[in-house]
Image (cartoon, grey):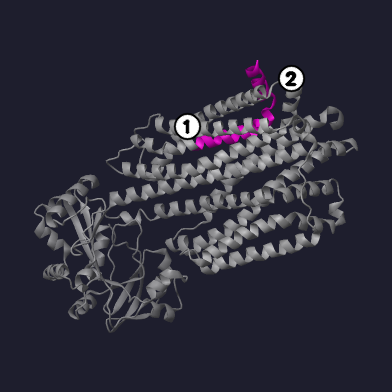
Amino acid sequence: MLARLAIRNVRRSMRDYAVYFVTLVFGVAAFYAFNSVKSQSVLFDLQGVASEDTFNLTAQFLQMFSVLIACVLGFLVIYANRFLIRRRKREFGTCLLLGMRPAQVSAIVLMETACVGTASLATGLALGLALSQGLSFLTAGLFSIPMQKYRFVVSGEAFVQTLLCFLLIFVVVALFNTLSLRRCKLVDLLSAAARVERSPVRGPLTGLVGFIVAAGLLAWAYVTLFESGLTEFGAEFWKATALMVVGTFLLFWSAAGFVVVVLERVPGAYFRGLAMFTTRQVASRVNTAFLSLSTVCVMLFFSLAVFSTGAGFVQVFSDGIEKGTLFDASLTANAYLAADDEGEKAVSVRERGEAYDWDVLRFLRDSVPNWDEFVEGAAQADLYQPREGTETYGELMGRLGVGLDGGLQEEALSSQTVGMVGLSQFNAVRALAGREPIDLSSGTYAVNNAVALSEDLSRAMAGEGVEIKVGGRMLSASGLYVEQPLSTSMFVTDGAMLVVPDEVVEALRAAGETPYVCYLDLSYRTDRAEGDRLLEEALARALPIEGQEGASGLDHATSPWPVTIVSTANETIEQSGGMRMMITYLALYIGFVFLITTAALLAIQQLSETSDSFSRYRTIAEIGCDRRMMFRSLLIQVAVYFLAPLSLAACHTACAVSVIGRDVLDQLGVSVSEAVFAAAAFTILVYGGYLLVTYFASRGLVRASLGKRLLG
């Protein structure tokens, strides 16, 4: 009997449970789908592009953030359930009045919770299974590999985690419901509908002063953030954060009173239709719920910022990967370490480098008998930064009037002398990359730049008539500007570099200059996977260094020449895909859950306000208010309640994302506009959907409360 009554109650209260149920379904689906990422690894060739370590690392990060997500969803479930219990207190009081025992009422509520929880878990897991299959295709896209091994994958581990997490949440909810009902007296339950939460009334002057102070604090926060930037999280950053949080809370604390004062001064708007009623309704709710609205605003800001910047950083790892993998592999030798260090081992290394005239390829051919059997082509590029008789980048920027948009990068570059590479080596690298060589006449230079950050400076350096002092001689610009990466790397760093005639390099070498870094770019005769394996074996034979690692991230830092680091195209693509996958999943997971949480909180609060205002709607209906006018007022209330925190969060996000774009993404050649538009579209879809669901649910509550007679 009690079970039938619980099921009937759930069916009868479907409108009340709609937001609660939908949010639970989304939460379960997201929790399962993102925790099943590790299981997707079986779909890919882990010996090729994607590595199992990448999936494991991503899964570890997602599971770590899942603890936070579970706490957020648990809070949401308890908060939503509190609204449902509060709305039905009169119903429970009637049951007790008719002779039911408190234990029986608690049992009914427990069964209702179990019923809704089971349905939401089942539906959410089904949706999560579908979503996880979509994530498999997204993963394949992030790694740029075909889905040749696709099959329907069910993650038992993610299923158990999701089940245990939400069972724990529902157990807590059930205990909360039982205790709250047992503590209530019969008279409190029966009179619950008559007691409406009263909101404190703030005077007009208080509201005006508070609003002005809040606006000043937010402006101060924005200016502080713009000036300090986001290159480091110092005292100014935390100051801007504190100002933003305090300003947000103060704005919502004072906004209602301020808006009422402003509208009262415009009689044509305030006394038109139900504007007075609508304004007072919104003001009453904002005055009461300013703390929750402020919290929602901060959470929305966090969600929007994560979405926008996450998409931007994914683009960072996508755009440069093609330029950074022109060669099958690149060996990097930090020759300046060998040249400068006076330690015993460094002296030995320097002697080796000088004996081979810093020619890495000749050393490896002498050390590895089968080198040419798997290496088809090789090109070495030695980079120089003469210590004397050469202009610094700071001097050039001052003379040309072009910088790097300020920041730490410009400060670090200013003290360095201009970098350069010889023409013949530069053309050898271009030939290995399948590109045409360039020509230079004596006494001229070209500018090579493959970095967006230094493009303006590089083009200014390449301008006709510009002269640069190199090693005590003046070279004039040939007007030639090229974009040629010199090594395999996830982030191309070859920027604002001179390509000089070979006689200039010979003169520098004769004066005792040595290259500060040597790149040896390779092209294999075999496929990349086999070539990487043979290269690892060759280097292990040529450089038997204690503690040497495998080819993925091979590190010879204890012997800076001839090989310090090995970067392969496969390794670079794998690392890039792994970073894209991790950032994408974290941004989607955290951003989505926070977005539905904030939207659900606002929806529940608005439904609660509508439920508390039945008497007011009944009053205006009895005096003849038109039904359309009443529902238009309700729509405005819901829209204002949803859009007010979203608008302020959008302002916070615009400030933060613009600073991140200026300090980080723009310098990496990535525009944040596409990421912002994508975040805005997704927010409109999810947040707007909750807004519409809330409006229709509120309208249904009002319609049911007034009945056909009053609605006409």
Label pair 1/2, CB-CB below 8 angstroms: no
Count of numbered circles on the image: 2
Q: Amino acid at mark 1?
A: Leu
| Other-residue count near label 1 (Cα within 10 Å), few / some / many at <14 / 14–19 / ≥20 | few
- The part of the chain drawn in magenta is 1-30
Horizontal side, residue 42 vs residue 302: left or right: left
In the image, residue 141 lies at what x, y percent? 40, 42
Residue name at image x 25 percent, y 74 percent: 501
Q: Is residue 622 magenta?
A: no
Label 2 packing within 10 angstroms: few (<14), some (14-19), many (20+): few
Q: Which numbered tag is attached to residue 348?
A: none
Q: Position of residue 178 (x, y in %)?
A: 63, 30
Of the pair 553 and 468, the residue shown nearer to us: 553
Q: Which residue is at the front of the view, 385 or 647?
A: 647
- The residue under the point 25% across, 60% down is 431
Q: Is residue 681 left or right of residue 11?
A: left
In the image, which disc is placed on residue 164?
A: 1
Residue furthest to the top in view is: 1
Residue nearer the viewer, 516 or 710: 710
User: Which residue is tagged 2?
Assistant: 99
Q: Secondary structure at mark 2?
A: loop
What secondary structure is the stretch in magenta mostly built from? Answer: helix
Between tags 1 and 2, which lies in front?
Answer: 2
Q: Is residue 492 among what the camera can see?
A: yes
- Is label 1 in a helix, a strand or a loop? helix
Is residue 635 shown left or right of residue 375? Answer: right
With 423 as the anchor, is 167 left or right in this view?
A: right
Residue 521: x, y in percent?
A: 23, 59
Q: Is residue 17 magenta?
A: yes
Tell me where residue 312 appears, x and y as whole percent: 47, 54
